[in-house]
Each structure stands twice: as structure tokens, then as C-alpha cells.
């Protein structure tokens, strides 16, 4: 029996079409600009998000940190939501790589208030760091999508103060599906964007950053500095092209499955589903230790060929993706029901 892996939408396996494309990919040395498959992917990626240019990077974390390094000067400050991925899950890279400090703001379901953003911008004071960048996250890793009106208001504030906006769009296409808009309508509200090919889109690795040509030209050199010049990387880009051309079109299935999973989970005694963060492919829920311990749940589900992560911030997170079907969800819920009872 296969494993049902609910830990993340990064655990997807490449499709058969992707594997075939990888095997047959035309490649060259990307550092010299000679890899035709990477060049095609970068052109496609820029078109998808309405930017002048795009650049392939090894991972989402790499892409975000490269964007911070490219946008800012050492000692500047970045305004960002306190539970954004860049703050919580990127190993403090902004201090090490870009040499900037993060000014974290309170959020509601991952959403910063524009007035808080404006109030956090530093004035010209000899004692204060200069605000060099504002970062937003869309869709947010807590399962929410930021309304376009909020993104536009933050972008307008940034432009008023001549500050760039970077978007961590790891799950950008999930956000577009949830909002029912073209991704370009979202990315119109930022100067640069990072989005993953390996989160939900089934590519085995890689992310993209996109922005103006001058931004990407600068980022390309910094990518080399960070060790991201990976030579014949068209073998990965081949899968990325299929991810962008075909896999984004099926993300609504994952969203529907997540809502189905939320409903099934709510049927279990002692389970409290977080209902106001069901915008994308994730389900968050709480379950007390006296219902079943975290350790027991993880171990017993694993014995039944189900992989889950442990609790973070008092919540479990189950993630739907291309390799999780409704039948899989029913099996998971039935298994949990037997364990709880």
C-alpha cells in the first residue's frame, strides 16, 4: 500500500509526463545563459506573473533571501508579518545573507493592516535603520489568502515612500484559484515575487523569482554569489514548464479536497477545525492530548501508511495535493476515528 503523505504539498511526486520531459530535456550551461530549457521556463514564468523577467532558483527560501539581498542594503530594515515564512521558517537567513533586520508586525490570519505598515516605516532619524523593503505573503502559510484590496493598499503606501514590495508567493497559484483571478492581478501589487514550482505544482524542485529586468539582472549575479549557478539545470526546468503550463489548472481539486477533509475531520470527537483559514489546500485543526497524544497519533498513523507532521503553535496541519484523493481522505479519517475510539 502506498503512503498517504499529508505533511505538505512539497511531497508530491513528479508526473509521468514530467519524468519523460526530464529524460529528454535539452540542456546547456545556465551560468553562461546556454540552457534553452531554463531560458524557456524563465520567459514563461515572467509572462505568467506579468513581470519583465524571471530567474530560476533552487528553492523558495533561496528565492526569498535572494530577493531581500537584491532589494536592500546592509543595515536596512524589512517590514513583514510576524508569522510569515521568511521570519519563521528560513533559518534567520535575512540576518546572515542580506544583513538586514526584520521589523515584524502583528497579523490577523497572516494579514497585516496597511495602517500598521505605514506606521512602521522609519522616518529620517539618525538613530533608526532605514526601511528598505516591505514583504507580503500570498497565499499565507496559515491557510489564508490576503484580499487584493489589502495588497493594493500596502503597495500604494510603499510607492508613496519609494519602498519596494517583495511577495513571498510560494503558493501564488493557489491564491489565484482561491480569489478567482489571474495571477498577474495579484503580482501587480509587488515589485518582485517568488513562487514555488515544487509546492502543489508537482515539480520535483525549484522556484522562480520575477521582477523588472534590472532587478533580475542584479539578482542573477547575487544568485551566483549564493551558490545558485547550477549549470545544466534544464533537466529540472523541463518539469517546471509542465508545472506552470498544466498543474496550476488543477489546484481547485486540492482546495475542494481540503474542504472535504475539514468536514470529515469535524465529525471526529474532540477535533476542532479552524474554519476561517480554509482558503487553499490546507486544513488546520486542534485536538487535545487527552483525546490522543501527539506522539501516539503520529506513530499509529505511520503504521497505517499515513504520514503527518506534529503540532506547531497548538495546531495540526494536513495538506492536500495531487497525490491525495478523496478515498485517501476517507481512509485517513476512518483510521483516526478508530484510534480515537
Image: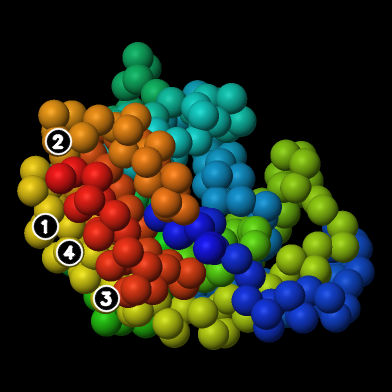
Q: Where is mark 4, residue-wise?
A: 264
Residue under the point 81% across and 63% down: 233
Please indicate whether residue 51 sits to the left or right of residue 269 in the image: right
Q: Where is mark 3, residue-wise?
A: 256
Residue under the point 72% across and 70% down: 237
Cα distance in 3D space between marks 3 and 4: 12 Å
Query: For the residue carrying disc 1, how many other residues have a C-alpha within 10 Å: few (<14), some (14-19), or many (20+)?
Result: some
Cα distance in 3D space between marks 3 and 1: 16 Å
Q: Earlier in the sequence, mark 4 or mark 2?
A: 4
Q: Secondary structure at mark 1?
A: helix
Q: Secondary structure at mark 4?
A: helix
Image coordinates of residue 10 in percent, x first then y, are 51, 56
Relative depth, front residue between 334 and 104: 334
Q: Earlier in the sequence, mark 3 or mark 4?
A: 3
Residue under the point 77% across and 81% down: 20
**Marks 3, 1: nearer the viewer:** 1
Cα distance in 3D space between marks 2 and 3: 27 Å
Q: Quadrant of residue 292?
A: top left
Q: Where is mark 2, residue-wise?
A: 291
Amino acid at each position: 500500500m502506498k503512503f498517504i503523505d499529508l505533511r505538505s504539498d512539497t511531497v508530491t511526486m513528479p508526473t509521468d509526463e514530467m519524468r519523460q520531459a526530464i529524460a529528454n530535456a535539452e540542456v546547456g550551461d545556465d551560468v553562461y545563459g546556454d540552457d534553452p530549457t531554463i531560458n524557456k521556463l524563465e520567459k514563461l514564468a515572467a509572462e505568467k506573473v506579468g513581470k519583465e523577467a524571471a530567474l530560476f532558483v533552487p528553492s523558495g527560501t533561496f528565492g526569498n533571501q535572494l530577493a531581500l539581498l537584491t532589494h536592500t542594503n546592509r543595515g536596512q530594515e524589512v517590514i513583514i508579518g510576524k508569522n510569515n515564512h521568511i521570519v519563521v521558517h528560513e533559518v534567520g537567513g535575512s540576518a546572515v545573507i542580506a544583513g538586514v533586520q526584520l521589523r515584524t508586525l502583528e497579523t490577523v490570519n497572516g494579514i497585516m493592516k496597511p495602517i500598521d505598515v505605514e506606521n512602521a516605516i522609519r522616518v529620517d532619524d539618525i538613530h533608526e535603520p532605514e526601511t528598505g523593503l516591505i514583504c507580503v505573503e500570498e497565499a499565507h502559510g496559515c491557510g489564508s489568502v490576503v484580499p487584493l484590496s489589502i495588497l493594493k493598499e500596502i503597495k500604494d503606501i510603499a510607492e508613496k515612500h519609494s519602498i519596494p514590495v517583495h511577495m513571498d508567493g510560494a503558493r501564488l497559484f493557489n491564491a489565484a484559484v482561491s480569489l478567482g483571478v489571474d495571477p498577474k492581478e495579484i503580482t501587480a501589487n509587488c515589485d518582485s515575487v517568488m513562487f514555488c514550482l515544487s509546492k502543489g505544482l508537482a515539480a520535483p524542485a525549484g522556484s522562480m523569482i520575477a521582477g523588472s529586468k534590472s532587478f533580475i539582472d542584479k539578482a542573477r549575479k547575487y544568485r551566483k554569489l549564493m551558490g545558485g549557478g547550477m549549470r545544466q539545470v534544464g533537466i529540472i526546468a523541463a518539469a517546471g514548464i509542465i508545472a506552470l503550463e498544466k498543474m496550476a489548472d488543477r489546484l481547485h481539486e486540492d482546495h475542494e479536497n481540503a474542504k472535504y477533509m475539514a468536514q470529515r475531520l469535524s465529525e471526529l470527537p474532540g477535533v476542532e477545525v479552524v474554519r476561517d483559514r480554509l482558503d487553499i489546500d490546507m486544513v488546520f485543526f486542534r485536538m487535545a492530548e487527552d483525546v490522543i497524544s501527539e506522539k501516539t497519533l503520529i506513530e499509529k498513523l505511520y503504521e497505517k501508511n499515513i504520514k503527518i507532521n506534529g503540532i506547531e503553535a497548538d495546531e495540526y496541519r494536513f495538506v492536500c495535493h495531487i497525490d491525495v484523493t478523496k478515498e485517501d481522505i476517507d481512509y485517513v479519517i476512518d483510521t483516526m476515528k478508530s484510534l480515537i475510539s
